[in-house]
Image (tube, helix red, strand yellow):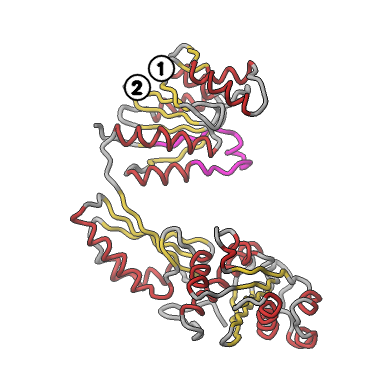
Amino acid sequence: MEKSNKVYLLSIGDELLIGQVINTNVAWISSKLNEIGLKAEEHRTIADRQDCILATLNELMQPGNVVICTGGLGPTGDDITKNTLRQFFHDDWRTDEDVLLLLEKFMESRGRKLDAINKGQANLPKSCITWLNHIGTAPGMLFDSANGILISLPGVPKEMAYLMENYGLDFLKSRFQLVPIRHQTFHTEGIPESQLMVYLRDWELNLPSHISLAYLPKAGRVRLRLSQMNPGNQNAAGFETECRRLIELLGIECIGMNEVELPQAVLRALIEQNATLATAESCTGGSIASLLTAVPGASNAFMGGVVSYDNSVKIRTLGVSPEDIQYHGAVSSVVVESMAKGIRNLTGATYGIGSSGIAGPGGGTEEKPVGLIWIGISGPYGTYSRAFKMASDRAGNIERSSFAALNLFRKTLLNGWVLPKPTFWTFSQK
């Protein structure tokens, strides 16, 4: 087995460069490579031009290197990758009969006949090894040369993933000496990255040399990724010990691990208590409900929600007092608590969440500036509310408010309805 020197991910497509298509392929491939012990050296995106492709390959293709290339394998004239690769490897064409048969069956299953354009997908460079694509028309191609390895895949994400999972990953594992890497990811919400770093500094500085910690912030959330290089029996116990220690340090602020993010954690807590939840949303516009219903099995705990954007809906549907709105304003503690109680009464849910705020960019006042969000929580043990001060970005405020509401509710459940308080950091609450 060889030792791979460097792995490069090469994305080909003008649509990627102009922002018409978001490049999700690099994230998916990088993640899968990391699972088997490979790390991408560089992600590079280039235009659908022969000179760009050839120049990049001349730079990246070196003995021991691996270049994983996506895009430009379609049947139309603007898909030039396959012909450019043929020229790069000084190849002739060959017709792959297995691909041709697969194309005929693929078209037949869709009630179509194989035309001359799609038939051209079976013409491949002679030196490549074919990876059959059973969910699309473009096969994968493996060029295993003395000057490095090139893997060429379709740009369509599901086809790329199919070929990597059925051919690419197994090939790489069989060909190279790989050092496994183990990861555990821990989710937090509403905690500034800088304060997390200060609090965890002493523990982080004393981690064994083969274990490292990474901070991955996004829109008010921070993921903590604990990684272990070359995990073996002698190191497994130490890694588990550090995972437990991190959970202890975070306490209730640890939402979950790996795939258990905030919506999943909320639904799990509800199911464990045989309880249900409903939402009454104003400024968040249904985003809280959307986060919950995106989780499979959400119907076991989530009953539904009302987007009460206009005050008339708050009054008629949720039973909010018109006098309270007039005196306190829709963005107030009184109103969100009334909304949370109203949605419980309307749906029969155990708990209710209400949200109201000024998402921006306009509508703020000196007393109630843009970014002021009130969240109300109501349940069998009482009703309360908290105010959060966000920024001036509308989309960001809606996203952050939705997560803040779910996290406030999660901690309420876990605390046994004792109102959550800040622990070792300062929350953006009033």
Residue 425 found in image quarter: bottom left
| Residue 61 visible to the viewer | yes
- Measured from the top left, where is residue 44 in percent x and y? 47, 38
Which residue is drawn at the image coordinates 64% and 62% (left, top)? 395
Which residue is drawn at the image coordinates 33% and 68% (left, top)? 246
Residue 148 found in image quarter: top left
Q: Is residue 18 magenta?
A: yes
Q: Secondary structure at mark 2?
A: strand
Tag 1 near tag 2, CB within 8 Å: yes
- Residue 210 is labelled as none
Q: Secondary structure at mark 1?
A: loop
Q: Which residue is mark 2?
A: 145
| Mark found first going from the N terminus, 1 or 2 | 1
Observer-nearest of 274 and 53: 274
- Measured from the top left, where is residue 214 in percent x and y? 37, 59
Question: How far separated are the C-alphas under marks 1 and 2?
Answer: 9 Å
- Residue 127 is labelled as 1
Mark 2 nearby-residue class (10 Å; few <14, some 14–19, many ≥20): some
Which residue is drawn at the image coordinates 76% and 83% (left, top)? 325
In the rendered view of the protein, which quadrant contains the C terminus? bottom right
Task: Look at the picture and state if 378 lies above or below 404.
Answer: below
What stretch of residues is rendered in magenta? 8-25
* Apparent side of residue 321 relative to residue 155 in the rendered image (left or right): right
* Apparent side of residue 362 relative to residue 204 in the rendered image (left or right): right
Observer-nearest of 191 and 248: 248
In the rendered view of the protein, which quadrant contains the N terminus? top left
